[in-house]
Image (tube, grey):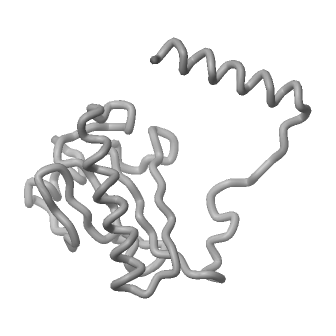
Amino acid sequence: MTCAFCRILRGEASACIVLEDEISVAFLDHRPLFPGHCLLVPREHYETLMDLPPELVGPLFRNARLLARAMELGLGAEGSFVAINNRVSQSVPHLHIHVVPRRKGDGLRGFFWPRQRYASEAEMAEVARKLREAIARLS
């Protein structure tokens, strides 16, 4: 496979690994938002969160939580930013969780999302209805 993260997992590419277990590996992002920015990836190749088997969701997010806590303890971070891109803006098509140390005034405000309001309460209700129907179909 040519997946950059699979190459790291197989030891064919270097990475500064900070956490690994039988489920996942976390390594420093080579272009961090801030020092300590990690990417947590499952050992098996899954492209998106929706592809991840349900039994791996808990263990993977336990490691994301552990990384976030380690950033506070080890780096003196005041908090963290945890994010996943699925397809859109996903630079490597291998599921990865960004865990980024945060500090007040670090300049990340508004970094990802230009926020907007719904045009009306009716539009908001319609979007909520569509999501509830989709959830019911998927459940």
Where residue 90 sits in the image (x, y, percent)? 44, 47
Where residue 60 sits in the image (x, y, percent)? 28, 50
The residue drawn where x is 26% and y is 67% is 27
The residue drawn where x is 42% and y is 72% is 32
Name the one closer to the observer, 123 or 35: 123
Residue furthest left as drawn: 11
Q: Is residue 75 above or below residue 68?
A: below
Name the one closer to the observer, 69 or 20: 69
Where residue 115 sits in the image (x, y, percent)? 76, 52
The residue drawn where x is 67% and y is 19% is 130
Name the one closer to the observer, 128 or 89: 128
For residue 111, side relative to residue 114 (left or right): left
For residue 80, side relative to residue 57 (left or right): right
Q: In which quadrant of the rendered image does the N terminus lie?
A: top left
Q: How many marks?
A: 0
**Where on the picture, by quarter, is residue 52?**
top left
For residue 115, side relative to residue 66 (left or right): right
Where residue 67 sits in the image (x, y, percent)? 33, 68
Q: In which quadrant of the rendered image does the C terminus lie?
A: top left
**Where on the picture, by quarter, is residue 70?**
bottom left
